[in-house]
Amino acid sequence: MKEEKKGFLAKEGVRSVIASLICILGGLIVGFIVLVVLAVFNENISFAEAFKGIVTVLGGPFSAGSFHDAMFQLGNMLFQSTPLIMTGLSVALAFKTGLFNIGAPGQYLMGAMGSLIVALSIPTSVVPPVIVWILALLTGILLGVLWGAIPGFFKAKFNVNEVIVCIMTNWIAANVVSWVFKVTGDNFINYAETKVNFIRKTATNGVATWSFGLNDLFGGSYLDISIFIATVIAIVLYVVMNKTTFGYELRACGFNKNASKYAGMNEKRNIILSMAIAGGLAACGAALWCLNGSQDFKWETYLTLPADGFNGIPAALLASNNPIGVIFASIFLKYLGAGGSNLAAHTSFNEYVSPLIIAVIIYFAGASKLIKDLLARAAHKKKTAAAALADPTSRDPGGGPKEEPASGTANPPDEDSAKDDLIAEDENAEGGEES
Amino acid sequence: MIFLLQKTLIFTIPLLIVALAGMYAERSGIINIALDGIMIFGAFSGALCALLLRRVPFFVDHNQLTFVIAMTVAAVSGALFSLLLSFSAIKLKADQTIGGTALNMLAPAIALFFIKVFFSKDQLEMTPAVNSAGSVKDFGYVIQNDKMNPVLSIFFDKAYISTFIALGIFILLSILIYKTKTGLRLRACGEHPQAAASVGIEVNRMRYLGTTVSGALAGFGGYVYIATVANGQATGAVAGMGFLALAIMIFGNWKPLGIALGALFFGFLKCLGVIYDQLSVNINGKEIFFLKELNLPMYFYNLIPYVAVLLVLAFTSKRSRAPKAEGIPYDKGMR
């Protein structure tokens, strides 16, 4: 029993999951506190209402009211998770290679633009819709790759911080997209339904992602197979990053640029490649969303950036940058979002509770290294205690620390002091927090 | 021309003060990517304060007093909000970029949540209110004088009180960080905290100080932005001004003089995007709207500042000198 328990906490992956769960719990608690505080200060809102509020958020799409509505919301939640999975993968990949891709919104917009233009301008009477669909997806990805390569290029060539370049390219993309659609307006803007703020749906040209009845299964929602495409991409990404030389090189450059240069890797090329792939992933998410066929894309976007681009950051952080984890993290975030919409519909609170909870979760996620270290210490203590109990003569302190370097390579953002902490902890058994 | 310069000044002030905010945090060793979020939070609380105060006719009569009080509230709330960042960065030793991103998401969420709950709207508007004499009053300018010589009128005609306060604070804080003991210590903590600690400087306290000053300035800047540039509307966004300020700080090489130049440059470009179609030159008594006649879309002028940032960064990156220890949690054991 004891053996099993120490093994449980000693695994890096398990610690990451527990750390994420702690962050989520923290976020939910803060969200609940906000609702209660509001109930205290606002006579119109009772405590019962605050309690109902948090239950509604927790219920996600299931707190919709009726079974049919719940299925409908569930379907839409899964559909909307698709672009988030892709931007999450984009941010996670960049994190793994030591870069912070806050440029996902811009890459997302470029992807949307590319896929929409191709999907709407090639007549499906001439070219089969399948081909158009594939071409549109590829064009979107290509634009994203190019857009993502810009910050990578600036980082590699001029050593400019990628964060600042990403933010600039975001706003440039927002203006470029508005500009392009303004100029080419008549071809793409939805005048037919007098929704002049939006681009025509791709279904009007017969281009739509196949849903194989999934949409009807989920109460007439937008669900199509794009979520499976995203899942496959996530798995492929996981294999490439963890099992191939190419992935190893990318991660090595993120871990230590100089060391990988010394080892003969082309570190500049790898930085540009990482950002380009990240850009392609984010753009792919946008393309999958647009090619659903029934989505309204707001073209005059020069003042706002798509939320799904930024929310890739929480998705990646919650998943500890693990591609498979990103799938679950994204679905969870959209689950909270659906809960927020139901909150606005059924109680006197509003939908902004969900972003608030997500923001708090990210705040805690920033400290997840600390949480993981504490968990590692707990595991290590248990291990030594168990070892001492089982056989006082064979005390070897190797088990715990041996695990640590592995965690370092798996997770670049927490490189340096994980080992030091553990060593320091060995030396003074007190192991209290730094005061 | 005068009109353009007056407008440029209005756009420059928030950028100037927020870029200085970034400098104070980063010089103490904390990356403050949360400038945008703190601006949003400061703008929200400042606007809320102004709205509540202006329900009393006395405060509508004394517009400038209300303006200054709201500004102070914005600064204080910005400082309090930034404690979240310094706590996570110093105490929890969290990744500062992630902590800042969290704040950037938290600020609009909080602002919009409360605005929606209490006002059932998506934005707060500091609309004109009725004063004790029964007439409707706006915040207005502190000085308005059409008959002034052109050079002076850039500064003293149609000027907001915040402009003078901000310039004063900017000069004061620029001197403080270079000429006082505290300023020197603060800078030391951003360069080599272990060395600073070895001569008895409390690194964490200095970092808290730097971030708090930064938060106060950013909150102040956020309020100035919505009050002077964004028509008194507090929404859950400041149009990326915080990030632009961050770029200006890097452009200015983490130094006040560079920041002042950068803010002026980008303030000008940013302002051009808004008023390009109102600019005219008077040739032989004929007004010519030379930029409007180029017939370029608004998006083009919106693009210029961002493209300019990229170009400038590409060319100046060689001599860029960021504080050495920024972004690295202080670890006593690394001495």
Image (cartoon, rainbow, N blue to C red):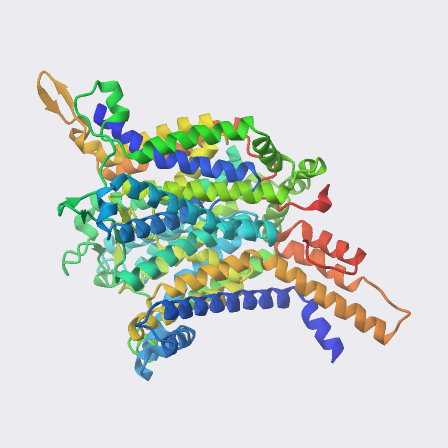
> In the figure, B31 relative to A22: above or below?
above
Q: Is residue B325 visible?
A: yes
Between residue B330 and residue B214, name the one nearer to us. Answer: B214
User: Residue A126 in the image: x percent, y percent?
Assistant: 23, 58
Q: Quadrant of the N terminus of chain B?
A: top left
Q: Quadrant of the C terminus of chain B?
A: top right
Rendered image quadrant of residue B202: top right
User: Residue A80 in the image: x percent, y percent?
Assistant: 37, 65
Viewed as shown, does residue A380 lie left or right of A310? right
Residue name at image x 38 percent, y 30 percent: B167
User: Residue A4 in the image: x percent, y percent?
Assistant: 72, 77
User: Residue A160 in the image: x percent, y percent?
Assistant: 50, 36
Between residue A57 and residue A286, name the one nearer to us. Answer: A57
Residue name at image x 27 percent, y 43 percent: B230
> In the figure, B43 relative to A127: above or below?
above
Name the residue furthest right: A393
Between residue B11 and residue B273, name the one nearer to us. Answer: B11
> In the figure, A68 relative to B224: above or below?
below
Viewed as shown, does residue B252 lie left or right of B70? right
Name the residue furthest top: B284
